[in-house]
Image: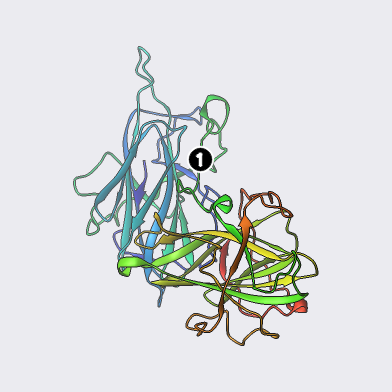
Amino acid sequence: MLKAIFGICVVATHLAAVAALDFTGAQWIWIPGRAADGTTYPPGNATFRRDYYPPAGKTPLSANILITVDNVFTLFVNGRQIGTGNDLRYAHRYCVPLVPDCNVFAIEGQNVPSGTASNVGNAAGAIAAIQVRYTDGYTETIVTDSEWHGIAGAPAGFEQVAYDDSNWPPPFVQGPLTTYPWNTGPYVINIPPETQDPGPSLTSATWIWTNEVVSGSAPVGGRAFRKVVTLSGGQLADTITIDIVADNEYTLYINGLVAGSGRTFGAAQRYQVNFIPSNTVTIAVYANNDGGPASLLASGQIRGCACGCGANAFVNTDASWKFSTAVPSPAGFINPGFDDSKWGQAVVEGPYGISPWGNPTIPTSNTAQNGPITDLGAPNAPPASVVS
């Protein structure tokens, strides 16, 4: 199984924008000693370690971990047991808080005997991807590869941060997820969804607009909308997943940064945005009407950053949102701290499903970050960190 890093923590050098976690780039590893058939190992335990130190100026917040092992594993992070698995076909996800300096990932794996009279071995391998999230919203992804250390058996204390594995050799790298015999036939690897949270619910949101709608029509042009969500109990959040659609166009901003834009009211888009941990989340929308009816519909789930998991708050478009009819829209309205105390309260036009908008398609996957619709007056701003 997997065992995580070296006796001396090393500094990761590759920083990337946040992406959905899968086994991309990860390799099946085990200790040396594979049989001449190129597939089987003798029964027994193997332990793997990787320790990780963040780049200068970066502070780790949490780790999302995806792992499976042929056949059995126990996963440890910084000496604490996190989880176990005993069926290689089903990968496991874990979300774990990290410490600001050296973090150690360790796995004890077992290759279970085949059960035949000769008690011969069989295929053995461990594969994992670990997405480390920093406090500034970026991530580093660590995968099982030749940088891990591995050894036969399970030495006492191997899971502890202070354990010295500098004399352990690198593991034997067998290949990516699709390497035979894995991910074929009866050994297809089932990857669980990224989150079990219910997520946004557009069907619980209401269509809103300004107070200018008369006989179902609104003036042509752009309008500014805002909603500031403050978490209770001093909680911090670092992620929002939001579904949004507007008649006719919108640009969405989270904490002053552009998440994306859309130009059709027949289908909503979903944006998963990561940001520096904060007790408040500022959602701003510049929505434009081309003529006739006008409306905005959105639903979001805000998640806390204790380890990047778990729902903290839900937000839907309703009468608590604020709007401005000023043209052009007030400078800086997309930013946290903007004073909208004199703005009007949004007018609810009706629930999801109401005419003339009916049932816009609810998204099932994330939309990539894209720019503001500046030709319609949407403010320009730097891009948000969007999971695509």
Q: As displayed, is residue 121 above or below residue 190?
A: above
Quadrant placement of the N terminus: top left
Pinpoint residue 167: horizontal percent, then vertical percent: 29, 54
Q: Report which quarter residue 91 is drawn in.
A: top left
Q: Front-most of 12 and 86?
A: 86
Would you say 150 lies left or right of 228 here? left
Q: Residue furthest front?
A: 215
Pinpoint residue 147: horizontal percent, then vertical percent: 43, 55
Res. 81 in view: yes
Q: Residue furthest bottom?
A: 331
Quadrant placement of the C terminus: bottom right
Q: Residue at x 63, y 51 (%)?
A: 363
Pinpoint residue 55: horizontal percent, then vertical percent: 42, 72
Q: Front-most of 342 and 248?
A: 342
Pinpoint residue 207: horizontal percent, then vertical percent: 63, 60
Q: As displayed, is residue 335 above or below residue 176?
A: below
| Three-letter code for the amino acid on which mark 1 is drawn | Ile
Q: Front-most of 63 and 196?
A: 196
Q: Residue at x 74, y 55 (%)?
A: 356
Q: Which residue is mark 1?
A: 191
Q: Residue furthest right?
A: 291
Helix, strand or loop status at disc 1: loop
User: What is the crowding at mark 1: few (fewer than 14 residues within 10 Å), some, or many (at least 20)?
Assistant: some
Res. 74 in view: no
Q: Residue at x 72, y 54 (%)?
A: 357
Q: As displayed, is residue 41 above or below residue 201?
A: above
Q: Report which quarter residue 43 is drawn in.
A: top left
